[in-house]
Image: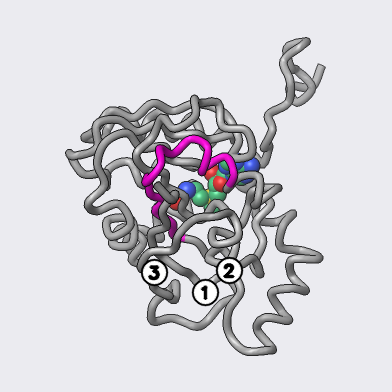
Amino acid sequence: MPLRSVRARGVPRDAVHHPLFARCYARISVNAETRMGMARVRERLLTGLSGRVIEVGAGNGLNFSHYPDTVSEVVAIEPERVLRHLAVEAALRARVPVDVAPGTAEALPVKSEAFDAAVVSLVLCSVRDVPRALAELRRVLRPGGQVRFFEHGRGGGRVMTSAQRALDRTLWPPLSGGCHLSREPVAALREAGFTLGPYRRVMMPENGPALPSSYCVQGTAWRPA
Ligand SMILES: C[S@@+](CC[C@H](N)C(=O)[O-])C[C@H]1O[C@@H](n2cnc3c(N)ncnc32)[C@H](O)[C@@H]1O
């Protein structure tokens, strides 16, 4: 029997299943830490956080080593099996306690109002249902809790935005783990009822050519108290 078909009976397929993308992302993302300055971005994203934090779509756990000591616990949700295993390894090296668990952004397996902060980095582009995922973030944050986000989305002139939309309808999502290029994370957060704090537009890579995935935004949003 070919190995591929061996799956224990009754074990459901993962909600997110992108093994090839996961392996590629695990390599590319580690290179991007130094080559594209992602380590600096992650440091800025997480600075000043404290208390209980939920990170959604944690990938291979590259944020974990950047959480400050003031964070008492991180619950990291990752639906993709390959990435989740790498995240578990990264959790062992983190300075703060990190618990990695399966789950999706659209149905977070945690209690309501249990977290002081939520973190999403390069995830809203990939979730199946952005409004539902953001409603879930609101549910699990305490009133007055914050979302730290670093996301890419729509940007550039008319030619670039047309290219982003065309890629979203065709090649891009199947090739990149369900990612979309033309979403608007800031507008989505506002529509979900978050209060936008400071945010900044960032190009990734900062000094390289502008790619359809280059138009990033980093910031903070608050669940109203
Ligand atoms: C581009 S990777 C980013 C990983 C990580 N946050 C980082 O900063 O490197 C996108 C991540 O979103 C996860 N993802 C995709 N769909 C998801 C969903 N519905 N709920 C939660 N995470 C999801 C993927 O498994 C993957 O780990």
Residue 122 is tagged as none
Image point (24%, 41%), residue name = 50
Q: Amino acid at mark 3?
A: Tyr
Q: Position of residue 62 (x, y in %)?
A: 37, 46
- Earlier-in-chain disc, 1 versus 3: 3
- Earlier-in-chain disc, 1 versus 2: 2
User: How dense is the environment of label 1, judged by Cα within 10 Å: few (below 14), some, or many (20 and up)?
Assistant: many
Does residue 137 show up magenta in the picture?
yes
Residue position for label 2: 153
Please name whichever residue, 114 or 185, is drawn nearer the observer in this view of the structure: 114
User: How dense is the environment of label 2, judged by Cα within 10 Å: few (below 14), some, or many (20 and up)?
Assistant: many
Q: Residue furthest front?
A: 225
Q: Amino acid at mark 2?
A: Gly
| Left or right: 27, with 35 as reference point | right
Per the image, label 2 sits on a secondary structure element best described as loop
Verify CB contact (< 8 Å) between mark 1 and mark 2: yes
